[in-house]
Image (cartoon, coloured by chain):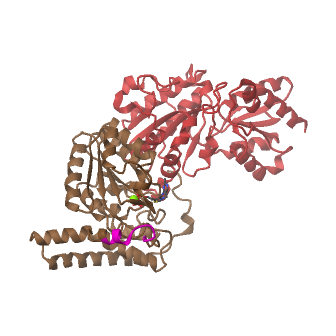
Amino acid sequence: MPEERNIQYVEASVEALQEEMRRDSSIFYIGQGIGQRGGNFKQSKGLWEEFGDRRVRDMPISELGQVGMGVGAAMAGARPVVDIVFLDMIMEAMGQIVEQAATIHYTSNGKFKVPLVVRAAMGSARCTGPHHSRCFYSWFAHIPGLKVVLPSSAADVKGLMKTAIRDDGPVIFIEHKFFYNKKGPVPTGEYAIPFGVANVCRKGKDVTILAMSLMVWHALEAAERLQKEGISVEVIDPRTIVPFDEQTLLESVRKTGRLLIVDEAQQFCGFSAEAAAVVSSKAFDSLDAPVSRLGALHTPHPFNPVLEAAMLPSVDGIVAEVRRLVAS
Amino acid sequence: MQRMRQFELRIQQTYRSGVMPGFIHLYVGEEAVAAGVCAHLSREDYVTSTHRGHGHALAKGVPVKEAFAEIWGKPTGVNGGRGGSMHIYDPSCGFLGTNGIVAAGIPIASGAAMAASLRGDGHVAVSFFGDGAVNNCAFHEGINLAAALMLPVVFVCENNLYATETPFHRVTRNTNVASRAAAYGIPGIGIDGNDVLEVHRVAGEAIARARAGEGPTLIECATYRPLGHFEGDPGTGYRPKEEIAEWKLRDPIDRLALAAMQAGLVAEAELRDIERQVEREIEEAYEFARLSPEADAATVTDFVYA
Ligand SMILES: Cc1ncc(C[n+]2csc(CCOP(=O)(O)OP(=O)(O)O)c2C)c(N)n1
Ligand SMILES: [Mg+2]
């Protein structure tokens, strides 16, 4: 076993940036309030002090301009990391992400690479309301050319950030603001986690749960409770939805025969539908029950705590749905 | 300028014959801008361009044959025919793309300038865009960022008075694009964009300032598009005939030729020689593109991910 320390998710992400920026002087970091302030979530703490204003630069409130600059700099040989802070604000920059960053490698016939990381934090952190809670990952998965990363643990955020920075194409790197300050074990030495390799977070034999980001935590908590009832749950975190590790999911479903997909984003037309389709078309014979999905309701995020709880998937909801699946 | 002009006319002819897919926007009449600006750039400098970008591509050094084949969608094109007219890219000469999205190249140029400035290699970026771009947020954000960071970039507006069929004065209260530079605390200058010598002089100063670390400049070039917005648009329904005729008299190539002859710098025969030389070059490019094979459908999923 490699040596580990218990550090915050956000600290692990900063370590990755720090180590990569020391290694490669073409990496720079831009975003709002990420300089001396160190970021809303402390997600860039210490970078400005170490690398200075030239490589760690506060931005005006110009999301499209920031990403556009990232695209141009990446085409011109740099490796920019653009911090959007709240994923909600990424909508302001969609044109540059979709039409430029994602597309240029293809339309240039591979002549221009766009090694750009766009980083942002998603999700509800309890009543953060419609403009500070969104989970837009499926939007990006739909765009050819973008890789989409959803780290759910401190160890993963560090290892995946390193891979994101070293990737030669644009990567949408989406953390969850709810667990930025939660601690987890992180290896001490150098490591990177490859894209497209799912993590089997918990082994089980009765039901498979596929979950991303914060929903992995919910699924693990539900699995713990269900264990006491004698239901054995396997929890799979794809870690990146593009590329998507179909194999690990299919193997698990072939073993358990039951699948629940938990999705913090609105379920309609989202990634959970894609994953369900993959399993239905490639492991249909192994299924003992129809694939089930638990996602957010098709509403904006309400501010009111009662309404918000009604809108989002919960641990209780997961427990109930797994019971139903096992009984069916 | 001759190369750009004849290239565009040959593209127009080819397109009209029905063999070229897609749709194209021609740069005819605006050549002085690309020529005057790009004369100051090396292959290591960067340019972002527009939907009307064939001229910028040639002026920045994209090979004529490969540009022709690209616009024709042939696999021998500079981007394998994958991009076409509005997606011409060439890293070997710092050409960061024509662009199907109005104003999108502006912040991209700022970013290229940022990369150059981090390296401290003295290279600059130039962004060309139309009057249609200046009311878009990418214009504001891209220029403000470049100004805030004092980046080595020059913003060149080709104000041809119309965005498709919409006259500029109908969609903004301030039609003086150069004056908008004041909003960003950078120099702004309006010039005759059909006078290549004036473009050359002013762009030279702006580019020298950028190289010296003195930050960005906004240059507004007054110019005109005598043809339609795209090939197929007669371009007459929304503009007075007199206006078109008047601007044709200010053709940038004719003006330079006349000035050069009057100054005794060149004889008419020499100009004809240049024309014929360019004609041969363009004809070769046309033949190269024409004889190129069709794309192989099996390559459709290549290059999606780097
Ligand atoms: C963001 C965006 N909106 C709309 C269009 C459609 N469109 C293509 S060219 C054009 C007009 C552009 O005018 P201008 O920038 O003045 O350039 P010109 O065609 O005059 O050279 C428009 C509206 C587009 N390509 N991009
Ligand atoms: Mg115009």
Q: Position of residue A213 (x, y in %)?
A: 65, 33
Q: Residue at x 37, y 59 (%)?
A: B161
Q: Is residue B265 magenta?
A: no
At a point 26% along the width and 71% down the height, the residue shown is B249
Out of A249 and B4, give the one closest to the viewer: B4
- From this viewpoint, which residue is outermost toward the right? A327
Is A202 on the left or on the right of B161, as rendered? right
Q: Say if residue B197 shows up in the picture.
A: yes
Q: Residue at x 33, y 60 (%)?
A: B56
Across and down, in percent, residue B109 comes to 37, 48
Quarter residue B298 falls in: bottom right
Q: Position of residue B232 (x, y in %)?
A: 47, 73
> Is B238 covered by the magenta stretch?
yes
- The red one among the chains is A
Residue B118 in sight from this viewpoint: no
Q: Which chain is brown?
A: B
- Residue A233 at x, y = what percent? 79, 32
Q: Quadrant of ligand 1?
A: bottom left
Viewed as shown, does residue B19 lie left or right of A202?
left
Q: Which residue is more in the foreground, B11 or A137?
A: B11
State left or right for residue A187 relative to residue B80.
Answer: right
Examine the rendered structure and indicate whether residue B303 appears above or below residue B112: below
Span of residues in magenta = B235-245
Which image quadrant is residue A174 in?
Answer: top right
In which image quadrant can residue B97 be found?
bottom left
